[in-house]
Image (cartoon, helix red, strand yellow):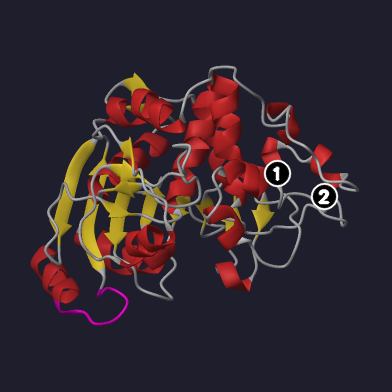
Amino acid sequence: MNKNDLHQYIAESAGNAGNICQICAFRDGENIYEDSWRGYKSDDAVNVNSVTKGVMAILAGIAVDKGYFKVDDKVLDYFPDYQVKRGEKTIYDVTIRNLLTMTAPYKGKSEPWKKVCTSDDWTRAALDFLGGRKGITGEFRYATLGIQILAGIIENASGEKCIDLANKYLFLPLGIPEHFVHGNSSKEDQFDFFMNKGPRKNEWYSDPKDTVTAGWGLCLTGKDMAKIGDMVLHEGVFDGKQIISAEWIKEMISPRIKLGRMFGYMEYGYLWYKPSRDKEVYAAIGDSGNIIYINKDLNVSVGITGTFKPRIFDRVEFIEKTVLSVI
């Protein structure tokens, strides 16, 4: 398959590739492949869903590099005025590392989306969900709302909004356009944000206090994601500039837990996946096939965006069987 074949295949696909908007690949800071579909241009942004978590891990690293906090700090250290519910003890022991590895414990069997996403302060509402009677077991529990707490910690520790930190220390140094908060968080608007298949602006969904949604809602292009991947691939360096410390990048992508069948038996670091034990491949993965893929063996990073489509999680196999052979 050549580049024209790949373009035609995606353009005509009604299957898992049928929602792909953009693919971009970088090697050593150079754009080596880029294409777009479904009316999208290369500079049109897409809600990349849980790839947002991977970016939050990078922002956490920037905060650590600047001395704002350490990963073994207790979560409640950064919410001194939070009123812990009567009888709740576990929450006192939860660390930032627990949030980053998805080993934080939560009350209940499901995430309280309605309670959190209709509140005036999503971080505080998510804190009410943290803890529980079982204590900290080290068990992996994928919790999108839990990462909202991480956003609150970054803001409280730094004294700056996450969006400002991201623009100043990540996006602009990578040549990614400055982003702004979305500015509406009604139930109807949230539905439209997920389901609307049109291009988005350079925005990040936010709660009523203009704190970004940390588990989803960042809008990026395929090129933006390939740049972020290239920076991670080169241990924090992009275009000759050290964006984030090599120490953090190594810590962020180092596997810490083996996931089960639901997650394809991948390994997990700090909000980043290692899909295969025997390959130097890492990824930030979101629903609808959005992905930042980096392959250290081939020195390549790939960004793929896609509009909402159910039951598409990761595109690692698609990249390795189809895209890499083309580029």
| Point 19% across, 72% down: residue | 10
- Label 1: how many residues lie within 10 Å, few (<14), some (14-19) or many (20+)? many
Q: Secondary structure at mark 1?
A: helix
Q: Which residues are magenta?
A: 12-18
Q: Secondary structure at mark 2?
A: loop
| Alpha-carbon span between mark 2 and mark 1 | 9 Å
The numbered mark, 2 or 1, whose residue comes first in the sequence reads: 1
Q: Position of residue 187 (x, y in %)?
A: 43, 61
Split into 4 quadrants, where in the image is the N terminus? bottom left
- The answer to whether residue 96 shows anywhere in this view is yes
Q: Which residue is disc 1 drawn over? A: 98
Give the image quarter of residue 265. Answer: bottom right
Q: Which residue is disc 2 drawn over? A: 136
- The answer to whether residue 101 shows anywhere in this view is no
Residue at the extreme top: 67
- Give the side of residue 256 with respect to residue 314, left or right: right
| Point 63% across, 61% down: residue | 112
- Give the side of residue 153 with respect to residue 237, left or right: right
The numbered dot on residue 77 is: none
Magenta-drawn stretch contains 15: yes
Q: Amino acid at mark 2?
A: Ile
Give the image quarter of residue 191. Answer: bottom left
Is disc 2 in contact with disc 1, using a CB cutoff of under 8 Å?
yes
Q: Amino acid at mark 1?
A: Asn
| Vertical placement of residue 107 versus 308, above or below | above
- Label 2: how many residues lie within 10 Å, few (<14), some (14-19) or many (20+)? some
Give the image quarter of residue 173. Answer: top left
- Give the side of residue 42 with respect to residue 114, left or right: left
